[in-house]
Amino acid sequence: PADSEEKELLAESKQEDEEKQQEEMEEHEFAKLIHLVQQKQKEQDAATPPFCHMMEISNLSPNAVGQFIADSIDRKVTDVQAITEAVYSKTLGNIFFVKQALEELVRKNAI
């Protein structure tokens, strides 16, 4: 039994490593694409408007997550405090994950 557990853990670890490598490669490819776009924009003459704009998106604060959840389900912020804490702890304020978590809670009729 211990041998099979070890093999299972090793297989899971290997799969996680492969997934991480794939994500890193995709991030690297995306970084290359961004760099290429930036270079092309620099090569344009000044009169030509840019065809791509960079925009940084930061994570929401816990209060902003609470406000987003409250607005989304038509409740007061004080009514969604427990949900806010749970969602924020899982998403750290990443709006894409906050939205996904909220959709999942609605889908499961949890809220």
Image (spheres, grey):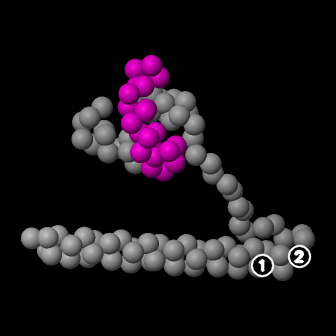
The x, y position of residue 32, in whole percent, is 64, 79
Q: Residue at x 14, y 70 (%)?
A: 2
- Identify residue for label 1: 39
Q: Is residue 57 magenta?
A: no
- Position of the C terminus, as image quadrant, is top left
Amino acid type, label 2: Asp
Range drawn in magenta: 75-98
Left/right of residue 30 with respect to residue 50 in the rendered view:
left
Q: For the residue carrying disc 2, how many other residues have a C-alpha within 10 Å: few (<14), some (14-19), or many (20+)?
A: few
> Does 5 sit above or below residue 77?
below
Residue 84 is left or right of residue 11, and the answer is right
Could you tell me residue 57's position as x and y percent? 63, 51
Location of residue 109 by image quarter: top left
Give the x, y percent position of residue 58: 62, 48
Q: Rounded to the nearest whole Å, what is the CA distance between mark 2 and mark 1?
A: 12 Å
Give SS at disc 1: helix
Number of the front mark, 2 or 1: 1
Tell me if residue 64 comes above or below residue 50 in the rendering.
Answer: above
Please indicate, yes or no, whether residue 59 appears anywhere in the rendered image.
yes
Residue in the foreground of this view, choosing between 1 and 57:
1
Residue labelled with disc 2: 45
User: Which residue is depicted at the point 84% across and 80% down?
Assistant: 43
Query: In the image, residue 50 lies at what x, y percent?
Result: 78, 67
Q: Residues within 10 Å of mark 1 (few under 14, many from 20)?
A: few
Q: For the view shown, which residue lies furthest in the front direction?
A: 2
Give yes or no for residue 93 being in the magenta stretch. Answer: yes
